[in-house]
């Protein structure tokens, strides 16, 4: 068993989370004006609107699916759905969202590379992030075909969930959960952690600027009728 596997799947998750949290806080406290996506929507409105909506819908769905799918303990979801059916649900819903996201991301990359005005407004980190997300998305889509080859055996899905949950429960020897899994799954995990590492230093931080509390508002009356 190589030190590389032990480091990547036992120690690197904590390094990635540490950089993600501390880096995001540091950037917010010291450079709040960069806490944005620097939208180039006005430079190519129609193509941007369509591709951006596809990309954001797909990636937000995938993020939520990964969050609940991997962090929900087996003893909880097993009361409502079997592991086999959960894997099938993840493959179908994740596949649809992944294709939508892939389509949108492809158009965004094409737009950024083909439009001179958008390219001028871009920097290295913009392209780096897009291609990194592109690779991660392709790995996720390829993993569906691997899962389909053993669709009646959800052991890989359970192993990946145990690995993610083990990070937060400080389980020893985390690498043992995934060491024997297919290379595609391990690459998908690695690039996911790599995205966490670069997150605070790119435009990805604009996800924190979304007005989440807006959906929790109680509402207020703008106009009152005088009696």
Image: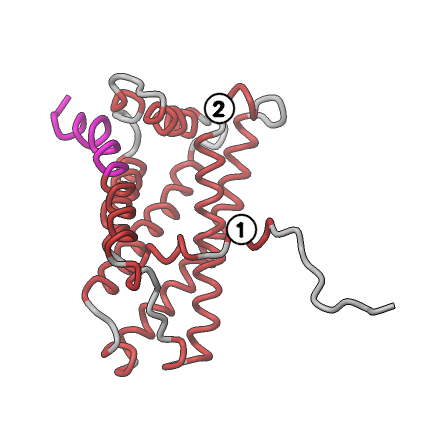
* Quadrant for the N terminus in the image: top left
- Nearest the eye: 184 or 159: 159
Q: Is residue 177 magenta?
A: no
The residue lying furthest to the front in this view is: 227
Please determine whether, in this image, residue 70 is positioned above or below residue 222: above
What is the magenta segment's predominant secondary structure?
Answer: helix
Crowdedness of circle 1 by 10 Å Cα count: few (<14), some, many (20+)?
few
The residue lying furthest to the top in this view is: 172
Q: Is residue 14 magenta?
A: yes
Q: Give the alpha-carbon distance from disc 1 to disc 2, as whole Å.
A: 27 Å
Drawn side of residue 221 relative to residue 153, left or right: right
* Quadrant for the C terminus in the image: bottom right
The residue lying furthest to the right in this view is: 227
Residue bounds of the magenta highlight: 1-18
Q: Residue at x 42, y 30 (%)?
A: 157
| Figure quadrant of residue 108 | bottom left
Instruction: Identify the secondary structure beneath mark 1.
Output: helix
Of discs 1 and 2, which sits in the foreground?
A: 1
- Mark nearer the N terminus (1 vs 2): 2
- Residue bearing mark 2: 73
Please determine whether, in this image, residue 114 is positioned above or below residue 80: below
- Nearest the eye: 158 or 71: 71
Tell me residue 20's x, y (percent).
Answer: 27, 43
The label shown at residue 213 is: 1
Q: Residue at x 36, y 81 (%)?
A: 43
């Amino acid at each position: 068993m190589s030190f590389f596997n032990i480091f990547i799947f036992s120690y690197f998750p904590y390094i990635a989370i540490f950089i993600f949290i501390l880096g995001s806080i540091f950037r917010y406290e010291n450079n709040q004006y960069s806490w944005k996506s620097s939208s180039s929507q006005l430079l190519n409105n129609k193509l941007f609107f369509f591709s951006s909506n596809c990309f954001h819908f797909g990636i937000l769905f995938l993020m939520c699916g990964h969050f609940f799918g991997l962090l929900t303990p087996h003893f909880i979801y097993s009361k409502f759905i079997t592991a086999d059916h959960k894997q099938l649900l993840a493959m179908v819903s994740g596949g649809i969202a992944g294709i939508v996201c892939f389509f949108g991301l492809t158009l965004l990359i094409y737009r950024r590379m083909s439009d001179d005005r958008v390219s001028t407004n871009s920097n290295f980190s913009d392209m780096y992030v897009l291609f990194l997300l592109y690779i991660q998305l392709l790995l996720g889509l390829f993993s569906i075909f691997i899962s389909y080859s053993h669709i009646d055996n959800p052991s890989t899905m359970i192993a990946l969930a145990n690995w993610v949950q083990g990070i937060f429960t400080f389980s020893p020897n985390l690498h043992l959960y995934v060491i024997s899994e297919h290379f595609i799954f391990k690459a998908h995990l690695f690039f996911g952690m790599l995205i966490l590492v670069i997150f605070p230093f790119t435009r990805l931080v604009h996800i924190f600027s979304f007005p989440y509390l807006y959906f929790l508002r109680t509402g207020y009356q703008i106009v009152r009728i005088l009696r």
